[in-house]
Amino acid sequence: MPIHADIVVLPGDGIGTEIVAATLPVLEAVARRHGHTFAFHEHDIGGIAIDRHGVPLPAATLEAAQKADAVLLGAVGGPKWSDPNAKVRPEQGLLAIRKGLGLFANLRPVRPHPAALGASPIKSELLEGVDIVVVRELTGGIYFGDKTRSDSDATDLCRYTVAEIERVVRSAAQLARQRRGHLTSVDKANVLETSRLWRDVTSRVMREEFPDVTLEHQLVDSMAMHLLSKPRAYDVIVTENMFGDILTDEASMLAGSLGLLASASLGDGMVGPDGSPQVKRQVGIYEPIHGSAPDIAGKGIANPYATILSAAMLLRHSLGLEAEAASIEAAVSAALDAKVFTADLAAPGRAVNTTQAAQAVIERLG
Ligand code: IPM
Ligand code: MN
């Protein structure tokens, strides 16, 4: 059934504008094919918002996002706003919109594509069949605790509540139930009190509510190693905010490029009880896991696939359009099979630019 959706578009900074501009025509092509209408509403976030409005998350941006069906985001940050003593930073806008929309579960799928295995520094035989989803807690922990700074010291508080741990573990466990039934919880329980709480709460929730899902605990340091030495051993990984940030940049090397990893930031009830996406018409944020890449910004050479794959997750999780989501994923896969690679993946002299890569996806939509 054809639907109408209001999508808030937040290009942000650096390559954010280029990859988002390349992704909108993909969404439009999907809409045309299936009779949907998508209205795109563009707003400022990050450095551009600081320049234009003096704040990294203008009230108008948050209000528009709250009213929308979904948010597509590029990236924020850049050298212009990176002075260590700056009072406002682009990244604060990103954290504030995640928190403001209550999006505590950040899904980051890692599925190395056969055609891109050669781009990974890891041996291909370790990568075949790897299919992981990292569920990163997104609105708590050290990212959001009180901070202090004096001439002689600085502090960042790491705090987690039982309720914050329970809800993200439930989302991850529901996902695991729908997949291969294996959940790995990552913490640093040998040192951190928040991790000991994390481990206790996770064990209880899993024992009481998900006896059919296998639970394994891993310390984050050894997890960082196992992720590269035996990535096939993992199904769903759930972890706190900062560990999830770090482990997913590492995990992107399994896929061959940071430019291939998409993400969905979801709130309550957005993963159905059986792990399926649940259509509550609830807003989520969809963004690539990479940053604004100031070194290549403005050149039109950034890899748009992570953003295009994030748009697929948007269709699936916020709009309930599973077939349309799958058609984008299949088209990206076909473009990769055809070795339509941007500079991060291509052999020297073989790279296509951002627009060409997106066009290759549109041509393969089926
Ligand atoms: C990410 C990014 C952000 C984060 C930055 C830009 C604040 O690295 O989405 O992974 O740390 O969450
Ligand atoms: Mn990150």
Image (cartoon, rainbow, N blue to C red):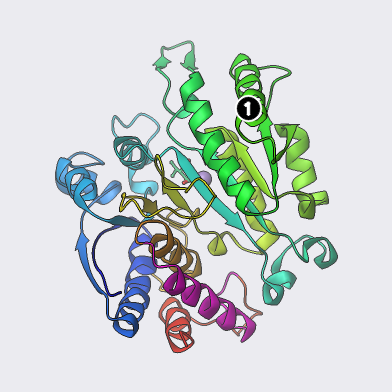
| Residue 285 visible to the viewer | yes
**Residue name at image x 29 percent, y 47 percent:** 47
Pick the residue in front: 44 or 129: 129
Q: Main secondary structure of the magenta part?
A: helix
Pick the residue in front: 331 or 346: 331
* Residue 118 placement (x, y as % from top left): 74, 72
Q: Left of 247 or right of it: where is 290?
A: left
Q: Left of 160 or right of it: where is 39?
A: left
Residue 342 sits above or below residue 297 on the image: below
- How many discs appear? 1
**Residue name at image x 47 percent, y 81 percent:** 361
Pick the residue in front: 340 or 171: 171
Displayed quadrant of residue 93: top left
Q: Sort mark 1 into few (<14), some (14-19) or many (20+) by Cα contacts within 10 Å.
A: few
| Helix, strand or loop under label 1 | helix
Residue 269 sits above or below residue 309 on the image: above
Q: Is residue 331 magenta?
A: yes
Residue 90 sits above or below residue 112 on the image: above
Which residue is tagged 1?
Answer: 208
Pick the residue in front: 154 or 24: 24
| Residue 160 visible to the viewer | no
**Residue name at image x 30 percent, y 74 percent:** 1
- Name the residue type under label 1: Glu
Displayed quadrant of residue 68: bottom left
* Residue 211 placement (x, y as % from top left): 69, 35
Range covered by the magenta-colored residues: 320-344
**Residue name at image x 19 percent, y 61 percent:** 41
* Residue 202 placement (x, y as % from top left): 62, 27
